[in-house]
């Protein structure tokens, strides 16, 4: 049984908010969030401080599409503003849903969303080699038109073209100390949504938004270290971590050490677009002083904490 006292971070993946089979309606999103929040509410009742992070894909891509659809009537916003937009909107959805779920099982408890700035290095190699796909697929003709507008387009041999953007590594959570203080006051905090809003920091300490997407899992691990959290619960669309996922010989893992996780990562067992960032972030968190990471799907939180489901990665 995993101890849930102290500060823990629950990270809700974007693919747990909009699942692969969903059409993406707001009703579906609220229902998927409710599934996670009902378990989080019971954890809150049991005690301990909770910080929630979340993904924003494909939601931030949808926001970009809305921008483009009316660009002849309303000036489109830069990507970093779309990041902030998604962080506020998804944060509100989690904030309201968790408030309602806590009300069912416990006394009313404050829940707040902090739109979070994440410092990245303007010289990060990711800016020279954008590789993070966002938004829908385009035809070759559409991709050429968008490339003339300054977008970098990546090609999928089967599905077509998508916009690709930089995904620099997070260096510092600007609001980490404020988040820690809010959490210590007994308030549940939703922060670093979608990896936070990427900003670059000038020598005089001023901040400026930059068009990029920060990986949610790496930002979560960084926030955990800066706020002193000891446990990350990573909620995704699979029940646990697998070797040979989706292939013959698929094997579920109930527990991993950091050394084992790194070995499998180096072998290519965890692809960059799915489980790879979660494992990489777990290694960084545990090597930075964290104690444990649990990876599972929202419906299995309690079973995973009891050691009966999910994957535990331990220092």
Image (cartoon, helix red, strand yellow):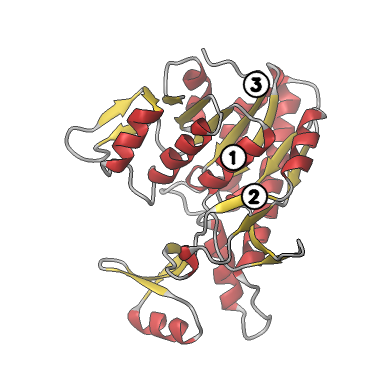
Residue pictured at 68% horizontal, 47% vertical: 91
Q: Nearer the viewer, residue 137 or 188?
A: 188
Marks 2 and 3: which is nearer the front?
2
Residue at the location (33% across, 26% down)? 253
Q: CA distance from mark 2 to mark 1?
A: 27 Å
Residue 41 on image: x %, y %: 67, 26
Residue under label 3, please give it. 42
Task: Specify which label sits upstream in the sequence, 2 or 1.
Answer: 1
One can see residue 131 in this view: yes
Q: CA distance from mark 2 to mark 3?
A: 31 Å
- Residue 198 horizontal/vertical position (percent): 62, 59
Whichever of callouts 3 and 1 sits on the residue coming sooner in the sequence is: 1
Residue marked by disc 2: 172
Disc 2, SS: strand
- Classify 10 Å Cα crowding around label 3: few (below 14), some (14-19), many (20 and above): some
Picture quadrant of residue 200: bottom right
One can see residue 31 in this view: no
In which quarter of the view is residue 51 placed?
top right
Instruction: Examine the rendered structure and indicate whether residue 250 appears above or below residue 130.
Output: above
- The circle drawn on residue 33 is 1
Q: Is residue 234 left or right of residue 256?
A: right
Q: Which element carries disc 3, helix, strand or loop? A: helix
């Amino acid at each position: 049984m995993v101890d849930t006292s102290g500060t823990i971070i629950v990270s809700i993946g974007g693919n747990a908010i909009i699942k692969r089979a969903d059409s993406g309606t707001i009703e579906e999103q609220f229902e998927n969030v409710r599934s996670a929040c009902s378990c989080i509410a019971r954890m809150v009742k049991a005690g301990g401080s909770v910080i929630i992070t979340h993904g924003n894909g494909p939601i931030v891509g949808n926001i970009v599409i809305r921008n483009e659809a009316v660009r002849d009537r309303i000036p489109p916003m830069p990507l970093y503003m779309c990041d902030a937009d998604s962080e506020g909107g998804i944060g509100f959805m989690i904030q309201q849903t968790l408030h309602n779920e806590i009300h069912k099982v416990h006394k009313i408890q404050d829940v707040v969303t902090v739109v979070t700035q994440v410092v990245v290095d303007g010289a990060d190699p990711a800016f020279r080699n954008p590789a993070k796909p966002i938004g829908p697929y385009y035809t070759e003709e559409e991709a050429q038109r968008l490339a003339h507008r300054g977008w970098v387009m990546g090609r999928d041999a089967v599905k077509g073209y998508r916009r690709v953007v930089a995904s620099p590594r997070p260096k510092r959570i600007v609001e980490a100390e404020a988040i820690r203080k809010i959490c210590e006051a007994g308030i549940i905090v939703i922060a670093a949504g979608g990896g936070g809003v990427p900003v670059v920091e000038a020598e005089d300490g001023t901040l400026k938004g930059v068009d990029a997407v920060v990986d949610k899992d790496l930002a979560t691990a960084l926030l955990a270290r800066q706020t002193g959290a000891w446990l990350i619960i990573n909620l995704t669309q699979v029940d646990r971590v697998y070797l040979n996922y989706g292939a013959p010989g698929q094997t579920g893992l109930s527990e991993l050490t950091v050394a084992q996780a790194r070995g499998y990562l180096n072998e290519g067992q965890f692809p960059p677009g799915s489980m790879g960032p979660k494992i990489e972030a777990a290694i960084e968190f545990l090597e930075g002083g964290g104690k444990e990471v649990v990876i599972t799907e929202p419906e299995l939180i309690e079973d995973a904490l009891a050691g009966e489901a999910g994957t535990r990665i331990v220092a």
